[in-house]
Image: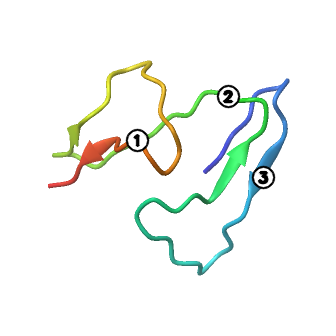
């Protein structure tokens, strides 16, 4: 789910219901930057720190069990 704040209401979503995404695929973006909340399943090992900048399709966020 992508959510933009009041000033950044410029969400682009390229994925559609039923699409299958692979590792590294992007499914959209929020123009002008924004905050992203990412929820990971229990047991994941985070590979980034809170507040760290991440680059879509490049930065590995976590290692799955």
Q: Earlier in the sequence, mark 2 or mark 3?
A: 3
Nearest to N terminus: mark 1 or mark 3: 3
- At horizontal 83% and vertical 25% (from top left) the residue drawn is 6
Secondary structure of residue under mark 2: loop
Quadrant of the image for the C terminus? bottom left
Q: Which image quarter: residue 62?
A: top left
Identify the residue shown where x is 40% and y is 64%: 23
Crowd rating for badge 3 (residues with CA inside 10 Å; few <14, some 14–19, many 20+): few
Of the image marks 2 and 1, the number of the one nearer the N terminus: 2
For the point 47% across and 33% down, which residue is it? 54
- Who's the residue at 56% across and 34% down the image? 36
What residue did someone put label 2 on? 34
Judge left or right: residue 8 versus residue 36: right
Q: In the drawing, does residue 39 fall left or right of residue 13?
A: left
Instruction: Tell me the distance, in whole angstroms, between the alpha carbons under discs 1 and 3.
Output: 20 Å
Q: Is residue 54 left or right of residue 34?
A: left
Checking the image for residue 12, the label placed there is 3
Looking at the rendered structure, the secondary structure element under dot 3 is: strand
Q: Tell me the residue that label 1 is attached to.
A: 59
Decide: marks 1, 3 in contact (CB < 8 A)? no
Residue 19, image x, y percentages: 59, 78
Residue 27 x/y as whole percent: 62, 60
Residue 20 pos. (x, y %): 51, 77
- Residue 30 - label: none
């Amino acid at each position: 789910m992508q959510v933009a704040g009041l000033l950044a209401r410029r969400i682009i979503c390229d994925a559609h219901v039923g699409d299958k995404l692979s590792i590294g695929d992007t499914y959209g973006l929020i123009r002008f930057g924004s905050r992203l909340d990412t929820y990971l399943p229990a047991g994941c090992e985070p590979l980034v720190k809170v507040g760290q900048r991440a680059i879509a399709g490049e930065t590995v966020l976590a290692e799955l069990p």
